[in-house]
Structure formats: structure tokens, C-alpha cells
Image: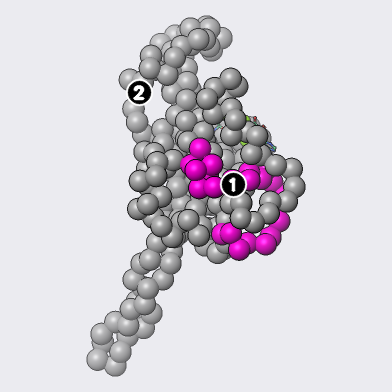
Amino acid sequence: MANSKYEYVKSFEVEDEVFLPNLVVIRIDGRDFLRFSQVHNFEKPNDERAVNLMNSCAVAVSEEYPDIVFSYGYSDEYSAKFENRSLCTYEHLTICCASIEVLQAYLAWRQNDCLINNQYETCLGMLVKCGKTESEAREILKGTQKQEKNELPELFHQGSCVFKIEVEDIVNYNENGTPVKRLRRKARIVHSENIARKKFWNEHPKLMA
Ligand code: ATP
Ligand code: ATP
Ligand code: MG
Ligand code: MG
Ligand code: MG
Ligand code: MG
């Protein structure tokens, strides 16, 4: 992040209130998750149980709070975009996005961070498996560029999105046994390679709310 092309996005992190027409994004990050992962013997860097736990929590929170229209997460963090009409205040790190373009830049930063951290941790793990000590491995990886680390499995590198999509639910049955269906909005986990692209947002216009 430091001195990278994404650095300017940090200036959109604000201490207090966000006023309309800015978009509101809240990022929460697990406290002491490293310790939690050690206690539960999570496999580094991406224990599937932990990823599923984080994603299930995001789905549950999204179902609970209708003001959350979209969220993106990886590792122990999730960023949630709120509906513009939302008037609540939240005690977390708040990011004030003046436009959808700023929101896209913010998401590009987080998704890039997800990729870089994953590549680094995966390489570190492989070097340790090959017999290096952790500090030797960190020394080898010092100064390596993204391209050099690119030949790694794509799995987990893009993080997860949670947003509501319309699904048909059977709510009842008629006397003759035919199901009565109703459209319901349910939170779903979606993986997408580049959530910062305009294309992604054009395909999901409801998320702009
Ligand atoms: P790098 O990409 O080099 O790891 P980063 O900027 O992505 O750096 P992170 O550890 O991913 O660093 O966290 C992002 C930033 O968000 C932190 O530098 C910090 O400014 C801020 N931040 C993270 N968690 C909190 C928190 N709980 N409260 C306040 N600010 C936080
Ligand atoms: P803080 O309280 O300052 O946020 P933290 O211990 O939560 O500290 P972070 O910087 O938030 O540390 O980093 C999250 C930690 O959790 C990293 O050490 C990361 O490797 C670990 N972690 C996150 N997701 C997983 C996962 N799916 N499997 C294994 N480890 C994970
Ligand atoms: Mg951190
Ligand atoms: Mg944490
Ligand atoms: Mg974290
Ligand atoms: Mg980081």
C-alpha cells in the first residue's frame, strides 16, 4: 500500500460522519485473528473453514441489515457498502466515497491487497515446506515483484462478495398441491475476478443503490 498507486484511496478514510450524496463503506477487521487461527490450527494462508466462517458471517449480517447492499471480504476483513438513505452511524473504520468511481478504486485497493497478501503467504508457506526457516523465507521474498510470484493457484486470490439476489421461494401449497412461489431477496456469496471494473457494476445495477 505505502507508495503504491492505491495510496490516495487511504485519504477517503474518515473519522466521523459521512454526508449525502457520498457513498458509505464500512470496513471491519477481525481482532487478533492470527491468535484465533493458531488456536484452531488453521492451515496457512487460507484455511477453508476460516474462509467459510467469514463468508457465512457476512451473509448473516447482510440478511440482518437491509441497508447493506454489497460487501467484499478476504482474510479477516469485510467492507460493506450501505444504501445511500442509511442514516445509522457505525463505530468502525468508515470510508467516504464521493462517487461510484471512488468506490471502485477502494475495492480495487482491497482486492489488490488480497492478491498480494495471498501470493506472499503462499510463497512463504512453500519455502518453509522446502526446508527454509521462516526468516530465511522472508529474506528470499524481500523485494520480489507480483509477476515473479504469479505462478500460484488462483483459488482464494480474489476474495468474496456478498450481495442480495432474487430467488424464487416456495411459500405455500395450493389445495391441488401446486406450489405458491414468491420472489425473495437473499444474500449470496459470489466470487468475481475484478469487482472494481465498471462491467461488474453495470451487470448489477441494484448494487448502486
Ligand atoms: P499493506 O498493503 O502494506 O499490507 P494496508 O494499508 O493494506 O498495508 P492493512 O493491514 O491491510 O494495511 O490495513 C489497512 C489499513 O486500514 C491500515 O493501514 C489502517 O490504516 C487501517 N485499519 C485497519 N484496521 C483498522 C482498524 N481496526 N481501525 C482503524 N483503522 C484500521
Ligand atoms: P489485528 O487485531 O491487528 O487485526 P490480526 O491478528 O487480526 O490483528 P490481521 O493483520 O488482521 O491480524 O491479519 C489476519 C490474520 O489472520 C493473518 O495472520 C492471516 O494470515 C490470518 N488469516 C486470515 N484468514 C485466514 C484463513 N482463512 N486461514 C488461515 N489464516 C488466516
Ligand atoms: Mg492488517
Ligand atoms: Mg485482524
Ligand atoms: Mg486483517
Ligand atoms: Mg494489508
Disc 1 under 8 Å from ligand 1? The reply is: no
Residue 13 horizontal/vertical position (percent): 66, 39
Q: Is residue 60 above or below residue 167?
A: above
Q: Residue at x 38, y 66 (%)?
A: 166
Q: Is residue 63 magenta?
A: no
Labels 1, 2: front one: 1
For mark 2, what is the residue? 152
For mark 1, what is the residue? 98
Q: Residue at x 56, y 59 (%)?
A: 83
Residue 176 horizontal/vertical position (percent): 24, 91
Q: Which residues are magenta?
A: 83-105
Q: Amino acid at mark 2?
A: Leu
Q: Pick whichever, 30 or 208, lies toward us.
A: 208
Q: Is residue 125 above or below residue 181?
A: above
Does 170 sit left or right of 95 as displayed?
left
Q: Residue at x 63, y 44 (%)?
A: 95
Residue 159 horizontal/vertical position (percent): 44, 39
Q: Is residue 110 above or below residue 131?
A: below
Kind of element beneath mark 1: loop
Q: How many marks?
A: 2
